Amino acid sequence: MEIVAEKRVVTAAEVDRLNLKYRKLDLHERIEELYNDFNLAEVMLTSSFAATSAFLLKLFSDVNRDQLVYFIDTGYHFEETLEYRQKLTDLYGLKVKSVSALKEEHEFTQKDKTWEKDPDFCCHINKVKPLDLVKAKYTVWVSGLMEWQSEHRASLNIFENRGDILKFYPLLDVTKEERDEFIKKHQLPFHPLVKKGYHSIGCSHCTSPGVERSGRWNNNPKTECGLHL
């Protein structure tokens, strides 16, 4: 049964204190310390089960296998993504819970091909809105963003108040080389599409082969789905 804690507000002074403390910690220490500063029931972890999602999920599996992992099932994922999700779930003993848009709203985007006309609106219906309902229950949201992935992500801190939730990016200051070394050392499995040239993997309509996030929303200046803005 899912345990729900009372959502609390983290002050700006507390955020500054957390950033000062966590900058000095290594990756495993950051995850361990998270559960000293927050109750398990306050923590929301999401994963797209994309190119190198095994990185963050391996860390959480090492520290706390009771952590629930939310997966936003947009209805437009590659079949390989769903297979990769199952592989990592089995490999790391994950507790994965899928969230999706309302049936009629998702069907509207199917018939309308909203991803072609207004990708921001399509992401809002199929990603942002479903997760907003989940976010309302939690104090802190963990995500695997890294600075080098985009200009927006380079502007973030390890902890940030974003709207009505505290964001925690334990991998934020990890370099691409450090990430690759961790993956090699622990022999983490890549998403099956990586070997086909996909380096950032989202919905099938909006993903093409390309370096890092250049293959997302091809021919569109959009670089974020809206979840992390």
Image: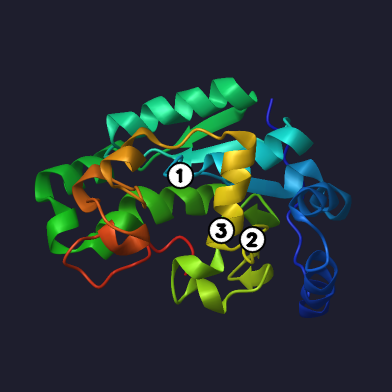
In the image shown, does 209 or 225 lie closer to the viewer? 209
The residue labelled by disc 1 is 48
Residue at x 69% of width, y 33% of height: 61
How crowded pointer 2 is (Cα within 10 Å; few <14, some 14-19, many 20+) is rated as many
**Amino acid carrying mark 1 in the image:** Ser
Task: Find disc 3 in the rendering and name its residue.
Answer: 177
Q: Nearer the viewer, residue 43 or 192?
A: 192
State the image coordinates of residue 16 (x, y, percent, origin top left). 79, 77
Q: Position of residue 119 (x, y in %)?
A: 23, 61
Question: Disc 3 or disc 1, which is closer to the eye?
Answer: 3
Residue beneath label 2, please? 169
Few, some or many residues within 10 Å of mark 1 (<14, 14–19, 20+) = many
Question: Residue at 65% of width from left, 73% of height from top?
Answer: 157
Amino acid type for the residue under numbered disc 2:
Tyr
| SS assignment at label 1 | loop
Provide residue 229's location: percent of width, then percent of height: 47, 70
* Numbered disc 3: secondary structure: helix
Distance in Å between CA atoms under marks 3 and 2: 18 Å
Query: Which of the two residues, 127 or 56, is positioned nearer the viewer here?
Result: 56
Q: Quadrant of the N terminus?
A: top right
Per the image, label 2 sits on a secondary structure element best described as: loop
Q: Describe residue 56's horizontal placement relative to residue 148 as left or right.
A: right
